[in-house]
Image: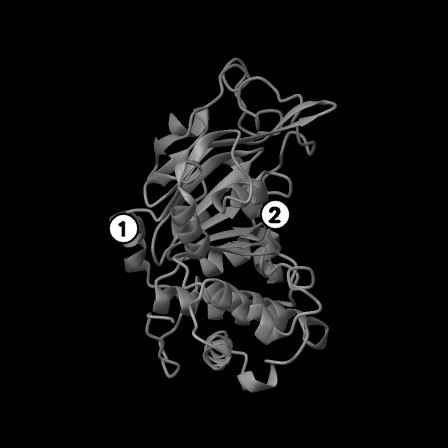
Amino acid sequence: MIDRTFDSTTSRAPIDGPPGADPSARGAVEDRIRAEPPVLALKGARQIFKTPRGEVPAVAGVDLEVRPGEVLCLVGESGCGKTTTARMAAALSEPTSGSVLYRGKDVSEMDRKERAAFRRSVQYIHQDPYASLNPVRTVYSTVSAGLRRHKLVKDAKEARRATIELLERVDLTPAEDYLDKYPHQMSGGQRQRVAVARALAMNPEVIIADESTSMLDVSIRVSLLNTLGRLRDELGVGFLFITHDLAVAKYFAWRGEIAVMYLGKVVEQGATPKVVNDPRHPYTKALISAVCEPDPDLARNKERVRLRSADIPDLTDLPPGCDFHPRCPIYVEGDCDAVRPPLERAHDRSLACHVVTRE
C-alpha cells in the first residue's frame, strides 16, 4: 500500500529551528533546492475573475516550482492571491492563462489516466479542519475512502490496518481510539491531523497546505508543523505551504524557499534565511517589521518601516508602474510609477523592484 519506509523510533530533529540553525549551511540552501527537478510547477499562471465592477486579476503571472522533499512557502497579506495560486496548483481551478505542469507535462493536456495519477500525487490540506471533514463520516471512513476508491487495499481488514498506520504516522495514538470517532468528537488539532492522514493515504509527492495551522492554538500549531516536517524528511514529500504568518514560514521553511506575494504577483523569492534575515524588497521589509517582538528591549530597538499609505490599491483599478509604489517608502517618481518592474535575479534572489535591483 505505502512503499515509503517509516521509522517511528527516529530521533532526528525534523526542522532546523531558525534561531539555532547552522549558519554554515545557509549558503547551500538554494543549491540543494535547485538540484532536483520540480515535481509541480506553475508557469506564467494567471487567474482573472470577471465581476460587475470589471476584471479582477487575482493572480497576475506567477512562476513557482515545488521539488521533492523541499518547502516553498508562499506568504503575503490576505487577498494577495495565495489561495487562488494554491487552487490552480492543485488543479481545483483552471488558470485563465499560463500552465500548471506535473513532472513537466501540462495538467490541462493530460488524459484520464494521467489526471488520476496527478490527483493522487498532489494532495490538498484545507485551512479549516472543522469544514474539511464530512461530519457524518468516521475517521476510518474518511482516511480509507481514497484507499478503497483507488483500490490500494484488498479488503476492509487491510483498509483498517492501513488507516491505523496512517493515524500513527501523524501522531494520533493509540490509533484504535480514533478510528470510530466523528469529527465533532475531536479537537481542531486532531481534526487537522486526520486531514493530513487522508492526504498521506495517496502516497503523495506534493502536499499543498493552505493556511493549515492558522486556526490552531500556538502549541498545537508547533506540534503539527513538527509532524509535517518529519513527514517531509522521511517521505520526501514536497510542500507548497501557504501562510500569512512569517513566523510560521520561518519555522517550517527554514531549509526551503519563501516567495512573497503582493496583489497577485511574486515580488521577492529566495532561500528562507536570506529573505527573513536580509529582506530586500520594501514590501518584504514592511511585512517583517510588522511581526510582533515579545522581547521589550528588542521591540524598542526594532527598525520600523513606515509606508507612504496604508491603503491597498483596488484590483479593478491598479496604479501604473509598480503596484506597490503608492505605499513604497523608497518610491522614485518618474520610474516606479511609469514602468512595471519584472521579477529578475538580484542580490542572490528574485526581486521585482527598480530601485533595489540597481543597488
Residue type of the residue flagged with mark 1: Glu
Instruction: Please identify the quarter of the rendering in which residue 220 is found.
Output: bottom right
Q: Position of residue 159 (x, y in %)?
A: 48, 76
Residue type of the residue flagged with mark 2: Ala
Give the class, few, some or many, for how many residues have Cα within 10 Å of label 2's Cα (few <14, many ≥20).
Answer: few
Please, is residue 137 above or below residue 35 in the view? below
Give the class, few, some or many, for how many residues have Cα within 10 Å of label 1's Cα (few <14, many ≥20).
Answer: few
**Badge 1 vs badge 2, beta-carbon distance below 8 Å:** no
Instruction: Please identify the quarter of the rendering in which residue 343 is found.
Output: top left
Q: Is residue 76 visible?
A: no
Depth check: give the residue in front, 168 or 92. 92
Instruction: Say which element carries label 1.
Output: loop
Image point 67% across, 30% down: which residue? Answer: 309
Q: Position of residue 169 (x, y in %)?
A: 46, 76
Depth check: give the residue in front, 200 or 38. 200
Image point 54% across, 57% down: which residue? Answer: 247
Question: Number of labelled discs?
Answer: 2
- Label drawn at residue 36: 1
Q: Position of residue 252 (x, y in %)?
A: 46, 60
Q: Is residue 107 visible?
A: yes
Please, is residue 319 above or below residue 226 in the view? above
Residue located farthest toward the front when viewing the structure as drawn: 155
Disc 1 versus disc 2: nearer the observer:
1
> What residue sits right under mark 2 in the picture?
290
Instruction: Say which element carries label 2.
Output: loop
Please, is residue 34 above or below residue 298 in the view? above
In the picture, measured across the screen, residue 234 lies left or right of residue 239, that is left
Depth check: give the residue in front, 268 or 334. 268
Quadrant of the frame with the C terminus: top left
Please, is residue 272 above or below residue 80 in the view? below
Image point 62% across, 37% down: which residue? Answer: 306
